[in-house]
Image (cartoon, helix red, strand yellow):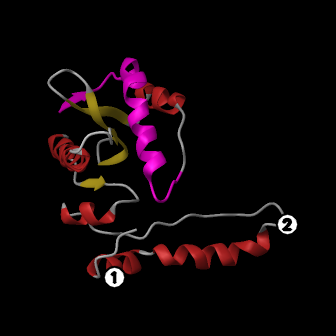
């Protein structure tokens, strides 16, 4: 495991790992282009760093994008080489290293992300509801907002926690 603060030049090597996770995900939130990661590398507020998991031969097999400031950290994107049998171990190592980074920065708040709840709760994470404000400017979309609100209520922290306790993870 290695932490890289100035990581723009390594993006071509890690981007395929981020994309592999997106393509494999049951719930695909958004596919981010390489330019997003370049902008992240250039970002100074919040600060960013990249954790990479490398084999002895230098091959990068995992990556974790971290954003942080003086008070909190957000582990935003994980990339994994799914060709390896150890991909589950790589995922756990990246999450664990992300937690270690928050501790080394002296931070009390760490946001682990919006998926893979089972391993994150096993690492000590707690589920919290998140909120999104939507305002429809298109008159045809406005009537759909109550339906969208109802649909998203299925993903409240209490329902996810109940599913985890039954052995179901989304």
In the picture as drawn, the residue positioned furthest to the right comes out as 139
Which residue is rendered at x = 18% and y = 21% of the image? 57
Circle 2 residue: 139
Q: Which mark is residue 162?
A: 1
Answer with mark 2 or mark 1, whichever residue precedes in sequence.
2
Indicate left or right for 57 with 117 as reference.
left
Looking at the image, which is closer to me, 69 or 89? 89
In the picture as drawn, the residue positioned furthest to the top comes out as 9
Indicate left or right for 3 with 28 as reference.
left
Residue 15 is one of the magenta-drawn residues: yes
Quadrant where the image shows the C terminus: bottom left
Tally the marks. 2
Quadrant where the image shows the N terminus: top left
Helix, strand or loop at mark 2: loop
Which residue is rendered at x = 26% and y = 45% of the image? 87
Category of crowding for the residue at label 2, using alpha-carbon neighbours closer than 10 angstroms: few (below 14), some (14–19), many (at least 20): few
Specify the segment rendered in magenta.
1-29
Which residue is rendered at x = 22% and y = 30% of the image? 3
**Image marks 2 and 1: residues in contact by CB distance under 8 Å:** no
Looking at the image, which is closer to me, 7 or 90? 90
Say if 43 sits above or below 97 in the image.
above
Locate residue 69, reporting x and y percent: 33, 41
């Amino acid at each position: 495991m290695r932490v890289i603060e100035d990581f723009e030049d390594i993006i071509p090597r890690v981007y395929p790992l981020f994309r592999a996770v997106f393509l494999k995900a049951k719930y695909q939130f958004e596919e981010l282009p390489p330019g997003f990661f370049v902008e992240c590398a250039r970002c100074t507020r919040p600060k960013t760093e990249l954790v990479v998991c490398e084999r002895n031969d230098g091959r990068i097999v995992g990556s974790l994008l971290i954003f942080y400031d003086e008070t909190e950290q957000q582990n935003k994107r994980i990339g994994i080489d799914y060709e390896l049998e150890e991909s589950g171990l790589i995922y756990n190592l990246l999450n664990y290293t992300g937690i270690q980074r928050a501790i080394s920065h002296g931070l009390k708040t760490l946001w682990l992300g919006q998926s893979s709840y089972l391993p994150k709760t096993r690492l000590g994470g707690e589920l919290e509801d998140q909120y999104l404000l939507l305002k429809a400017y298109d008159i045809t979309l406005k009537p759909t907002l109550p339906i969208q609100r109802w649909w998203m209520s299925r993903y409240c922290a209490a329902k996810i926690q109940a599913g985890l306790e039954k052995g179901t993870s989304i």
